[in-house]
Amino acid sequence: MSFKDWFREDRLPHIFCTGCGNGTVINCTLEAVEEMGWIRDTTVFISGIGCSSRAPGYITTDSLHTTHGRALAFATGVKLANPRLNVVVFTGDGDLAAIGGNHFIHACRRNIDITVVCMNNMIYGMTGGQGSPCTPPGAISTTTPYGMCEPVFDLSALAVTAGANYVARWTSYHVTELTKAIKVGLDTPGFSFIEAMVQCPTAYGRRNKLRQVSDMVTYLKTHALLLQKKQRMEEEGETVPADMFAVGEFVRRDRPAMGVLK
Amino acid sequence: MKLVIDERRCKGCNLCTMICPYRIFREGTRPNDRGIVIPELDRPERCTNCRLQGLYGRRLCGVCQMICPDQAISWEEEKPYEPRKVVIEF
Ligand SMILES: Cc1ncc(C[n+]2csc(CCOP(=O)(O)OP(=O)(O)O)c2C)c(N)n1
Ligand code: SF4
Ligand code: SF4
Ligand code: SF4
């Protein structure tokens, strides 16, 4: 058995653009699910709207493809109606942090026993490249033609502050680490949040001098800073470059969780 | 085991060429009938998984299969299996 057995072969190849990181994140998630030994009948994948949110459509289990931003609201309902189900949410940065921001905060606060995999491509991919709350300063998008002038939302920091039991961030290049992090997330009771930084060569890369797939993956690779290294730099009084993001495990704790079978 | 790229799935993104530690995947040169330039395999028998999956009974390395966003990379059983002498350069 491998993660490939979880795909709906009849629906492949999927509609993602050449080199889109979403496909890699689906592989890693399914590999983690497979390693957990979960079965199709009790696993549910839920998503909102966006390129990233099309993921459950390619998986053989039951799934819910809901309205924009509301994946967590539906997931909360599914989990509370039947706590025996394993619930995994696929979402994008726009879906989770913009229109679905409040659901995200409150799902973390409730610490409901689901796992959220956010494919953060720093842009609204599906609708053609509008700026999202995660678009880095200076980046060009259709709604920020002179460069983004707002600071970014650090989704992992938000999840830690709001009370999630497990929070980690990796990129689509770090496939082994990402798979391990997702597996720990699936295994942790309570709300687990895994942020996967992914390349979107079509809507983001094309406008930001990262047109080739490899350029955008190299960007993610070179701008990822290991959390331990970042902490060491801060202790030693070095300045951490503003355009770098930390990767690693941010929190693993045992706050009282909701929706866990006693 | 034999490393294969599924030509109907591959979209030619070349992510596999970036990640393989042995650089087994090389950027292709000629588009196929779907207009996609599929990577070429450079001495695929060097692949860790081709050589050792049978011995260990599990997938080894496998990062190319994980990163391939189009689920195009897999391994096929080779029959009859022929052990090959592999030269690994450092
Ligand atoms: C209520 C509502 N508002 C707006 C939209 C239009 N819309 C569709 S996808 C999308 C953005 C998705 O961005 P993200 O979640 O980052 O996913 P990506 O496509 O980048 O993976 C928007 C604004 C919608 N479908 N529904
Ligand atoms: S627009 Fe971006 S996120 Fe959407 S499929 Fe294409 S590369 Fe992926
Ligand atoms: S399994 Fe590892 S060594 Fe073998 S082709 Fe893939 S990346 Fe290269
Ligand atoms: S990573 Fe997959 S889709 Fe991309 S070039 Fe390699 S085999 Fe093709």
Image (cartoon, helix red, strand yellow):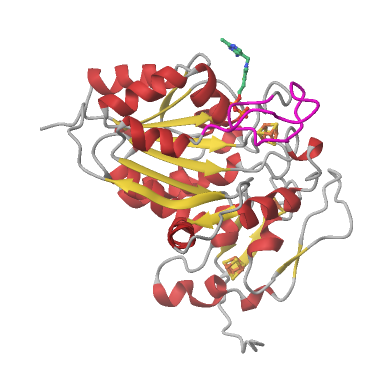
Q: Left or right of B69: which side holds A80?
A: left
Q: Whole-percent x and y of residue B18?
A: 69, 62
From the top left corner, tell me how far across and down residue B27 is, in percent: 80, 61
Q: Residue furthest left?
A: A262
Q: Nearer the viewer, residue A123 or A186?
A: A123
Give the image location of residue A252, x and y in percent.
Answer: 29, 47
Q: State the residue lying farthest toward the right.
A: B30
Q: Residue A13 falls in which quadrant of the image? A: top right
Query: Which quadrant, please, contains the C terminus of chain B?
Result: bottom right
Is any atom of residue B6 visible in this view?
no
Dominant secondary structure (helix, strand or loop) of the stretch shown in magenta: loop
At horizontal 35% and vertical 52% (from top left) the residue drawn is A35
The answer to if A143 sits in the magenta stretch is yes
Q: Which corner quadrant holds the N terminus of chain B?
A: bottom right
Question: Horizontal placement of A207 versus A54: left or right?
Answer: right
The part of the chain drawn in magenta is A131-153
Of A253 and A36, nearer the camera is A253
Quarter holding residue A206: top right
Q: Is residue A220 above or below residue A137?
A: below
- Relative to A79, residue A213 above or below: below
- Farthest residue to the top: give it: A67
At x 38%, y 34%, the residue is A159
Q: Quadrant of ligand 1?
A: top right
- Residue at image x 33%, y 46%? A251
A177 shown above or below A128: below
Nearer to us in this view, A261 or B59? A261
* Residue B88 in the figure: left or right of residue A57: right
